[in-house]
Every structure is written in structure tokens, then in C-alpha cells.
Image: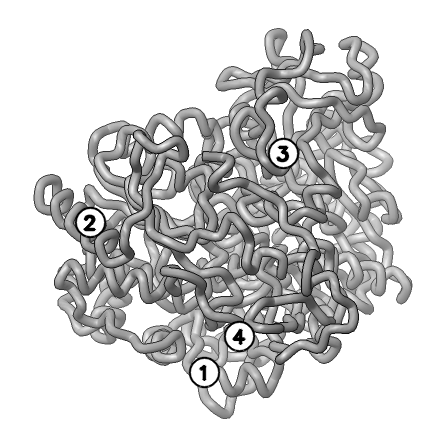
Amino acid sequence: MLERFGPHLAYMRGTRSATDLEPDRVVKTHCCFCGQQCGMKLKVKDEEIIGIEPWYEFPFNKGKMCPKGIKRYLQNRHPDRLLHAYKKDLSKPEGFSKMSYEEAIQKVASEIDRIQTSHGKDAFAVLTGASLTTEKAYLIGKFAHKTLQTSNIDYNGRLCMVSAGAGNNLAFGVDRAANPWSDIIGSEVVWISGANIGDCAPITTDYVWQAREHGAKIIVVDPRLTSIARTCDLFLPIKPGRDAALFNGILHLMIENDWIDHDFIASQTVGFEALAESVHPWTPRRTAEVTGIREKTIRQAAEWWGEAKTSFLMHARGIEHHSNGVQNVLGAINMVLASGRIGRKNCGYATITGQGNGQGGREHGQKCDQLPGGRSLGNPEHRAEVAKIWKMDPADLPKPGVDAYEIFREVERDKIKGLLCICFNPVVSLPDNNYIRKMLDKLEFFVSIEFFMSETARFADIVLPGSLHEEDEGTVTQCEGRVIKINKVVECPGDARQDWRIIQDICAALGREDGMTFESPAAIFEELRQASKGAVIDYSGISYEKIERQNGVFWPCRSEEDPGTPRLFEPGSWNPIADGEGPFYFPDGKARFNEATYRPPAEEIDADYPFMLTTGRVVSQFLSGTQTRRIGPLVDHYPEPRIEIHPQLAERLGIEDGQWTRAYSRRGDCTLRASVVRTIRPDTVFIPYHWAGKKSANQLTISAQDPISHIPEYKVCAVNLEPANGPPAYAAKLEPQQ
């Protein structure tokens, strides 16, 4: 299977290595990877993407790109590209045999119908992804809720932005970055918690460095001395999972030293008195004991933050990937609200979006409890509004379903029998992934829509060949809340189809075509505009033409005359929930303080598992690596995962740099080479999570979830380490790329 489907490596060869070749055309579009969605131009020759050029006029990145963006074009015409539909065939060495696209669609439809007829509508589930365009996300949500009428749809943003989204909704009533990134430049203090932006959001690093050039103090909170931490003014090396304790301790000092905005708190917020009482026990001494940060450093951070006149706080998965993730987010927001520095220039707050459409992908209906416009599937009024657009009875809409991980637990309970998966690689990306493999094997029927044969697709009964980013058009919403346009560059090869066409072909084969006969992404977007009108997440004033003319449109945008909303919560701003009462999205227009309850991680260290494991990304790889592990220059930069270990811990265990080392938890183990570095806490180890199989960090991680957001606790679990006797067995059976 590996020899047939890869991952193999693509390099700049042939026409791609020629420096004097004139392209037939150059197409403006955006990167296919992270939530920054940097603008770029792709060069096309003889219907092959041969290179990339900077798009200097796009305002977010102004031509700057990271290594992934520069090399993303090497996916086009990749030797691993799926050109046909496949069915499982264990008689073949590669495990699959080709079949016609039409036959595959008929098989998928017949199995969906069989399972739903025999076991009920909820017995078939859909898993989707936050790298799809917003049009596709909307369509798949409609497919699940209207066509299949199943409760069970969720997406891989469950592993990414849901703690941030839940915290934002609880505090502000809306889930979006409050400010454009341009507000970072000019802030007196920039606070970054749990965000390795040098590796994960490199263009954001440029904004932070520009702020520093304008005199800003940079505060970084992280268990690792990341690249941004090495250039900051104050570094807080926190123990993984202790962020709520730190934020409570900072707020305690803000109150004690009267570094709070009394007028803002009184006029624009609710709940401060109860919050102040809850943080009173969080003295600097107690905060230092829990977080592992020196008391002196905590006091300095509180003083800089408390005394600033302008500031910008941002965070990412480092505080959100926890069983206490929502509480961590609320603690960060409490610091911002208590300062009164939000809703104006250089006074901001933002969550750094991970996936390419991590913002738009969580807005229009592919979450288990959501309808378009950020509406709630459990709200009768919202159900009626969307049902009217979809021309169906609200009673026929399913009830809210379960989250992505719980879908697999429902498989174990024999409640879910079939699954369609698109743009999601749970075999690599979900915690305790040996369990996920067992559940995929247990399904009666599994269909995957993919452009490469991902590790998850290898479990499928049918694989349908979907589309790469550059083979379709549509919109995504990047980290600032700016809706942008992805432009089609080349056609799908072979029998591959655009994903939205595949979904509609399944509907046709099911005989359930009603409302699923769109002729283009533009037509889908027009219905999405109608479906979001009047909602919190209102796209009704956005058009493809306006996006192109303005280089993106910030939602909410409520009319054709409305230019959009780059900055939320400005004084005097209007929203449909407050209706003029104030800038925040509650009936009284006021923001909510929420007690940020500290809870330790679900799995504490003990004598058997005495070290904390945290996981994350590296600059040249992305998420489960389905794409980046096939791009030669990116693999060359970081070929294999390693276990980062502090020299003190390495000496104690007798481990040398580069030595094979076994990490093991209560769930699994992996053997990797050690990387002995001084940039990590001595009680913590780090493994990047982009690799599959025996190299997967998620063999070790715990499936504990936040009770509100249901995000898994990727950022801390208990492990042990030992020197390995030699190379692991997998080292003798290398992937083709190695």
C-alpha cells in the first residue's frame, strides 16, 4: 500500500526547476494551510502549477510567506494523487482496486440507505473538516441535517478552535477575533499564551516584531522556549495545564494594585464582583506554586499588563487543548475585560485560528449542534429560520448530535454503523488513536473522500477522489474574521471531482436531490448569504465581487452598502442581539465575566509515569501531515518526529542526543530519537504530532475532554521514558519517502 499510495516526495523537477519559463497565467489565491490564509499567486504552465509568486497587495501578509506556503504548489500533479475511485480489495497487495466513479457513488448511496433503513437515521454519521471552503462546510451541514436527517455530524475543528469559541461565546456572545492584526502594531504590551507563532503562524510573528519595533513589551507564556519566546521581553515557563491558575493570579494582582478600568467594568460588563471574590485566594505565592513560574516573574507580568494604556492578548491551542480549556480561555478574557482594553484601536484580543478555514468552518452548520449563521440546532426559533430557507418542516431537522470523538464511542456502543469522512484524518489526529483504528474496523460501512490516500482512508470500503484546494473555488474566513476568496487554478485530474459535486452526486443516487442541485460554489454562497441573514454571523452583505474589490470582507456584513466590521465591540456599534443596548452580543449589550475555575489535568504524573508530555507542531509540517509529508523540501527540513528532552532529564535517564528513546503512557508507546534541548521545562517532554503509525504522538495522548467544548487534552498527559535497546522495528520498513 505504501509503495502504491505513498507518501512519496515531490520536488522541483522538470518545468518546475526552470527559472526562465514564462507561465501561461498567474492566479491570485491563498495558501491551503493555516488560518492566516496568506495571499499568493500561483503560476500555471500547460495546466500544471509550476511555482509561486508573492501577492504584495494582499493586506494581511503583503507578500510574506512561510516554508509551507512557498512549497504548497508541489501537491499539484503529485504521484500520490488519487485519480480514481477505489474499493477495498484485500486480494490486492495495495489493499484496493479501482472502480468507476459512477459505480462507487451508487455503492455509497445504497449503503447509506441500507444502514439508515435498518438502524435509523442517526446510525450514519458524517465527519468533516475545517480546511474545506465555507461553501462546502455549509453544503455538508445541509447534507447531514436535511438530506440524511442525521444528528451525527461533527468536524475536526473539534480538535482545534472549540474551546476558544465556547469561551468567546460565554464572554462576548460571539465567536470571532475581536480585532484585525493591524491593531497589534502600536500596542504597549502584547501577551501571547500557548501560541508557538514562530512555527505555527509565522506571519503573525512579523506583526509582533513590528509591535516591538514600535516599543511594545512582549510577554510569552509557554512550557517551551519557542522561537517567539527567545525574542520576547518576559518569558513565563508554565507547567502544562495550569493557565487558568496563572490568569487568576494576574487578575488578583490587577485588583490588588487597582490596575483595572472601573468605568468600563461598571458600564460595559456583568459579573465582576463574583469574579473578584473567586480570584482572591490566588495570591502570587499560590499561583507560583501551581504554575511553576517564579513569583517575581508573575508580578512583573501583572505590572506590565496592568499599567499599559493599550494592549493585545492572543492565545492558541496551548491553553485550549485541555480538559479545562474553556476555563483557561475565560481566564484570559477576564484579564482583557478587567483592563477595559477592547473594542478600540491597539486594544484587542484574538484567538489564533489553526486550520485554513478554522473560522468559517465553525460558523455555518458542520458542528454537531449548529445551523448556518452560528445558529443553534437546539433553538426552536433558529430551526424555523433555517428550515424556511431549506424548504422543509422544522420538525424534520434532527436534534443536536455528539462530538467527533464521541462518534467513535457510539460506534463502540453499536449505535453508529456507517461513516462518511472528508478532510479529516482521525487515525493520526485523534488522541489514543489505537482505539480509533479499532472503531473504524468495526463499522459496517466507511467511505472516505480524499485527494491522497490518508491513513484514515486506508480503512475505507470506498474511497472517492476529491479535490485539492487549487482545483475549486469558494470562500474561507481567516484568523481576523476576514472572508476571502479561493480561486480555481487548475481542473481536477482523472476521475477526481470537486467535493461539493461528490456530495450532490450521492444525494442524486439516494433519490434525495431536493435542495442539493447547485451548479457552482457561487450558487451555494448565495444561499448561505440568505441563510445567515439576521444571525450573529451575518454574511448577507458579502459577495464574491466585494471580496475581490476589498481584498476581503470582515463579517458581520449586513448589506451591500456595509463595508464589513474589522473591529468588534466598538462603542456605538450595533448587533442583532443587543439591538442598540451596547456593543456586546447579549440583550443588555454588556460583556460577561466568568469565573475561570482551575482544575489540574485529567492525568497527573505519578511514580509510574513521572513526566508531562505536551504535543504540537513544527514549522515545516501541518496537522496530520497528509499533505506536508508528501512535499520533499518540507520533509527534508524535519524528516522525523523527535522527543524533546531537557539536558537535566536526559542525564538523569542516561539518554543522549539522537539516541533511540521509548516514550510510553497508559495507552501506548512510541520509539523516536531524542533531541536534547535547553528550550523545554525539565519535567516536560515534547513530541510533534504530524506523523502516523508507530511514529504517532497520539498513541500516547489521553482522550479526556473539556466538559463544555469537548476538545481533547492534547497538551498534557503523564508518560515515562527510557533508552531504547536499539532502533524500533518500523525503522527497517521505511516509507517510500525515506
Q: Quadrant of residue 123?
A: top left
Crowdedness near tag 1: few (<14), some (14–19) or many (≥20) residues, C-alpha within 10 Å? many
Would residue 656 be found to the left or right of residue 455 on screen? Answer: right
Q: Spatial distance from mark 3 to mark 4, Cα to Cα?
A: 34 Å
Q: Amino acid at mark 4?
A: Asn
User: Disc 2 on helix, strand or loop?
Assistant: helix
Mark 4 or 1, which is nearer the eye?
4
Residue 127 visible in the displayed image? no
The residue beneath circle 4 is 487
Q: Is disc 4 surrounded by few (<14), some (14 to 19) or many (20+) residues within 10 Å?
A: some
Residue at the image position 56 percent from the left and 61 percent from the top: 269
Q: Which residue is mark 2?
A: 107
Q: Which mark is residue 558?
A: 1
> On the image, numbered disc 3 is attached to which residue?
615
Residue 300 percent across, percent down from the top left: 85, 43
Mark 3 vs mark 1: give the one in front.
3
Q: Disc 1 on helix, strand or loop? A: loop
Instruction: List x then y, in percent, for residue 433.
Output: 46, 29
